[in-house]
Image (cartoon, rainbow, N blue to C red):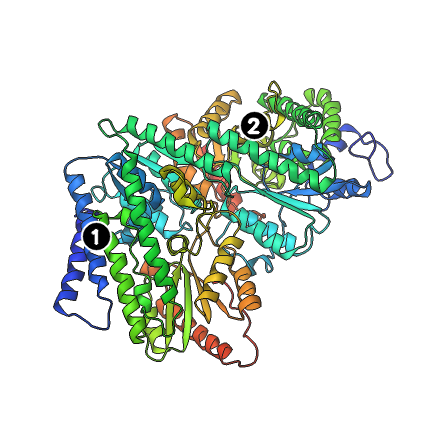
Amino acid sequence: MNMFEIEIAKNERRIKRIEDKPDARKLRTTKLYYELQRDQAKAQLDWCQQGRPFLAGNYSMFQLLAKALGVEWIDLGLVADKVPDVASKLQQAHAAGVPEHMCERNASCIGAYITTGLLPKPAGIIATAHDCLPFFITNNALSRDLGVPIFVVDVPLESGDRALEHVTSQLSEIVEWAERLLPGFSYDESKISELQEMDRLAHGYLREIYDFLKQVPCPIAPRDVFRILREPSCQADPKKGLSYFEAFRDEVAERVQSGVGAVVEEKLRILWAVSGPLFADVFEVLVERGASMPFFANSWSIRAYGIRTPLQGNVSELSPLQQIAAWTISTSWWGSGMRWIEDLAQIAKDLGIDGIVHFLQFGCTPVGGLGKLLSEKARKDLNIPVLNYEGGQLDATSFDGERFNKRLEEFLELCLMNKLGKPGLAPLPRVQ
Amino acid sequence: MGHHLLLDDEGSELDLEARLAGLVMANRPENRMKWARWWKGNGGKVVGILSPLVPEEILYAAGILPWRVSGTWEGNLDLALTHRSARSCSFSTHVLQAALQGEFDFLDGIVACDEDQELIHLWDVWVNSKALPFQHLLHVPFTESESSCRYLTGEIEAFKDRVEEFSGGKVTDDALWASITAYNRGRGLLKSLYGLRKREIPSVTGAEALGMVLAMTVTDRRQFNSELEEMLPWLESRTAPIGKTRPRLLISADKLDNPAYVELIEGLGCCVAMDDLDTGSRYFWQAVDTSGDSPLASLAKRYLTGVNQPRTASWEKQVAQLADWFTEYRIDAILELPLVHSIPREMRSRLLSSEMTRRGIPYYKIQREYSMSGVGQFRTRIEAILEALGAI
């Protein structure tokens, strides 16, 4: 089975499980979430089976360009997290020269492409270094491995008119490049405008949800915090995608109204940042200790929830390509790491956070090396502790879930002691 | 410091071999701050440079000494590892260790660029841990397009404005052109030196060549130029004290700033006849084009297209350069020495390896630590390579 078929089957199983055993304690919109994931995979499978071309890349917002050209997009970042039998793909990637210290998400992406038939070869790759340099390097390598052209979008450190002009002009060049690459497909900017409008509405719903998340008790379960859909423009049916965000907002509002908390007797609120630990059942640990997790911070969520708005001012006055450029320049993960640290501090303040789990997969360069600065900021400005932890994200064999859960339990205890005003914060945990 | 860059303890001129040795050892920990301290002692400012992509000419035009930052060569990294993972770029970790130990407290500032995120976060920790009168982080684009060139020109202009504020004086176009001329002169002299490495018995060993380029990065440019200019005629008649002239290797690496590594390789029975190092040839190979009207645009073009770091998109160009040098310098094999935990270099290695194989160019790769640890294992692997090349 190729990855699209695997995704379809996986999501259909999940939908069936929900239909067979509905659970009133869980979010109703989760079913819609899985339907949208399934639909997206179906659309891609369909496209693939017709032998039609894909574009691929590591930055989800460039998908708008693919849509405007009328082609399907492979989001290599999302692929990385869904690669089946990932341990063997990682082995294949390492055997092909991908360094072992490189982030597993990158290695899994290359491993996925080494496996014949798992993913269609894209007609071209659109890459950028600004979010995660290793992913840009992976894209660079993939284009050579697959023998496909690559267009690299250079993104500066700072915003401003110069940066906007620089990025926008490159996006215009992508259009010319792609039209040459994909004969018979032409760019229709009106498609972008329509999708951007839907994305804006979705971001609006997410901003409302963010306000709801400030409520105690937190209305969303920790598990659901990791389960947030990408924008409507990333969905096969963008209108259905938008309806998800609206329904999600409504459901969270309902819970806040009724005072329903996802965690019984909420004692702590934890902010999770960077990566999800896929091989440790942290959710049980959190719930058992009365710890809610209102937010999962990464470069996407910070943008989507409006914590970091485009640095360009009133984005809706810009042209569609300028808007993509403005959002692209605004990511937290390029430039000085203090931007990321300030964002996390802001979220922690907004949501009444009692502790931050800064969970990096091995080889994460976007935020690696910032743990101690974050801890110092959190202690000084918010008087809360930070657990800095490095671990495997995709390969179960590289991650000791039990050991991590033990650290998490200790950390939660520390947060609680701190919250209750017990003397002194313990020494800062070292980076693993 | 007088007419000569190097004087003995009594202030007398040294003979040429001694002067060469002095240059080669210029970047050793006990020596590398000498010229910077002399510069400061004469009322000047010194700014640390964290990447070969930083346009040093801007600082030099303002009368500031650009001074290349090296990491500690020691193994103890206790301070740095409270910030950084042991699995991260060891150059950045070693530099941070040195910074937190106070080794660079004499600097008036630091300038870095976004060569990679590891370097950016090194810069973050450094500027947040130490009060520095001046710090600047530049964006150097990843592509060589016209738009990137325009952007970098603007970045360099913004950098110049900040340098003017810091130095308290205007950096005029004339001053910039003069600075560029001095830098180009040094580049040309080193290129002439490297030309002498094409010989069957080169004039300098690989270690000596690397040492001399590194000397340029920690001394006053004009003084270095005078020194090398005086030495070149003598070097033309010199034969390097190498044990074996074959096999001839080209070594390719980043942040290799300890000539002892090269000395070790050559000591095992080979000649390092050329390098592809950002501390070696890539630092000086391409001059700034002085035919244009704008020194800033000329600098942008040079720093965008001339340094060829693996972090950019131009891998094919970088690989082709190695293939050209393979022929030009009559190389027998390319030896890549990626720094442990360097992602751009390691990922580019895959292309380099397949391309060299396609061209029938022997290619080998050995990972190395930034400091010379694990020397025994490194030596064994070099010996194995030389044996494979029929040297032993």
Q: Residue at x 76, y 28 (%)?
A: B16
Mark 1 secondary-structure assignment: helix
Q: Quadrant of residue B187?
A: top right
Residue B376 pos. (x, y %): 54, 48
Q: Amino acid at mark 1?
A: Lys
- Is residue A220 visible to the viewer in this orientation of the structure? yes
Q: Residue at x 34, y 35 (%)?
A: A143
Residue A293 pos. (x, y %): 37, 68
- Could you tell whether A338 is left or right of B182 in the image? left
Residue B266 pos. (x, y %): 58, 35
- Could you tell whether B256 is left or right of A272 in the image? right
Q: Quadrant of residue A275?
A: bottom left
Disc 1 crowd, CA 10 A, few/some/many (<14, 14-19, 20+): some
Q: Residue at x 31, y 52 (%)?
A: A201
Judging by the rendered image, the residue that carries numbered circle 1 is A240
Q: Amino acid at mark 2?
A: Arg
Chain hosting mark 1: A
Disc 2 crowd, CA 10 A, few/some/many (<14, 14-19, 20+): some
Judging by the rendered image, the residue that carries numbered circle 2 is B302
